[in-house]
């Protein structure tokens, strides 16, 4: 009874955080709402005894990906008002995409789960390790998808670095060859100062 109440409470908070992600006017606030949504999702993972997935969600997404996302959002200096000008012309496409996502989720919950989606899972035995089971599935059945995801994350990091290194007016660029070519006598001047006499 208590796990069910906790599930619905945290799921409600997760829905509020997700709505805050897409309705917030400030991209930084959207990112903070997304961090809050990730933390709530981690608590839901804990409720079904998937501790490894919960801590991975917090460490990887909240600790690394969201920091990178906030860094890119703050460095790009996006003009939000200019982006919102053509919002209404994309509304029908957004509604269609949202309906497709809802239909896919309903397909997974009602048809593919065979009635197990609304059943509280049985507790695992004492010696069960979800980390071992996850690793055995991830590196055997889904190894190619795992490698493709790693390559996509690497491309995202390279793209973020490229966007922050673009040339802008007033941006100081580093000239490595000029820095290496200098000598100490051009940079340091030794001045002899006489000591003060009493």
Image (cartoon, grey):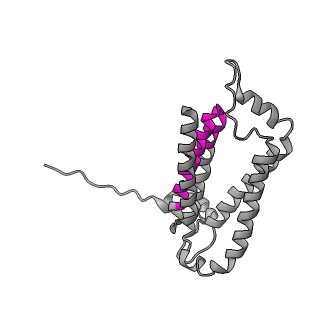
Question: In this rendering, is residue 5 above or below 186?
Answer: above
Q: Is residue 92 left or right of residue 20?
A: right
Question: In this rendering, is residue 66 above or below 5?
Answer: below
Quadrant hosting residue 75: bottom right
Residue at position x 53%, y 60% in the image: 20
Confirm whether residue 15 shows in the render. Answer: yes
Measured as percent of width and height from the top left, residue 133 is found at 76, 29
Question: In this rendering, is residue 6 above or below 98?
Answer: above
The magenta span reads 30-59
Q: In this view, does 166 lie to the left or right of 96?
A: left
Residue at position x 67%, y 25% in the image: 123
Measured as percent of width and height from the top left, residue 11 is found at 58, 46
The one nearer the camera, 69 or 195, is 69
Quarter occupied by the N terminus: top right
The one nearer the camera, 12 or 46, is 12
Q: In this view, does 17 lie to the left or right of 113?
A: left
Q: Is residue 137 left or right of residue 47?
A: right
Say whether residue 46 is magenta.
yes
Measured as percent of width and height from the top left, residue 148 is found at 81, 50
Residue at position x 56%, y 78% in the image: 169
Confirm whether residue 67 shows in the render. Answer: no
Question: In this rendering, is residue 133 above or below 171?
Answer: above
């Amino acid at each position: 009874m208590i796990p069910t109440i906790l599930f619905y409470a945290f799921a409600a908070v997760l829905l509020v955080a997700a709505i805050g992600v897409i309705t917030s006017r400030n991209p930084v606030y959207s990112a903070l709402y997304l961090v809050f949504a990730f933390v709530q999702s981690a608590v839901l993972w804990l409720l079904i005894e998937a501790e490894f997935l919960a801590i991975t969600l917090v460490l990887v997404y909240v600790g690394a990906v969201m920091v990178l996302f906030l860094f890119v959002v703050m460095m790009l200096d996006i003009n939000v008002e200019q982006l919102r000008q053509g919002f209404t012309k994309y509304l029908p496409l957004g509604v269609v995409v949202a309906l497709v996502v809802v239909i896919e989720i309903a397909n997974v919950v009602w048809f593919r789960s065979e009635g197990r989606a609304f059943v509280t899972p049985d507790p695992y035995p004492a010696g069960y390790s979800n980390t071992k089971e996850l690793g055995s599935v991830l590196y055997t059945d889904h190894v190619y998808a795992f490698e493709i995801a790693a390559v996509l994350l690497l491309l995202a990091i390279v793209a973020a670095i490229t966007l922050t290194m673009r040339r802008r007016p007033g941006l100081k660029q580093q000239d490595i060859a000029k820095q290496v070519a200098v000598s100490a006598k051009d940079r340091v001047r030794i001045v002899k100062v006489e000591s003060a006499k009493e």
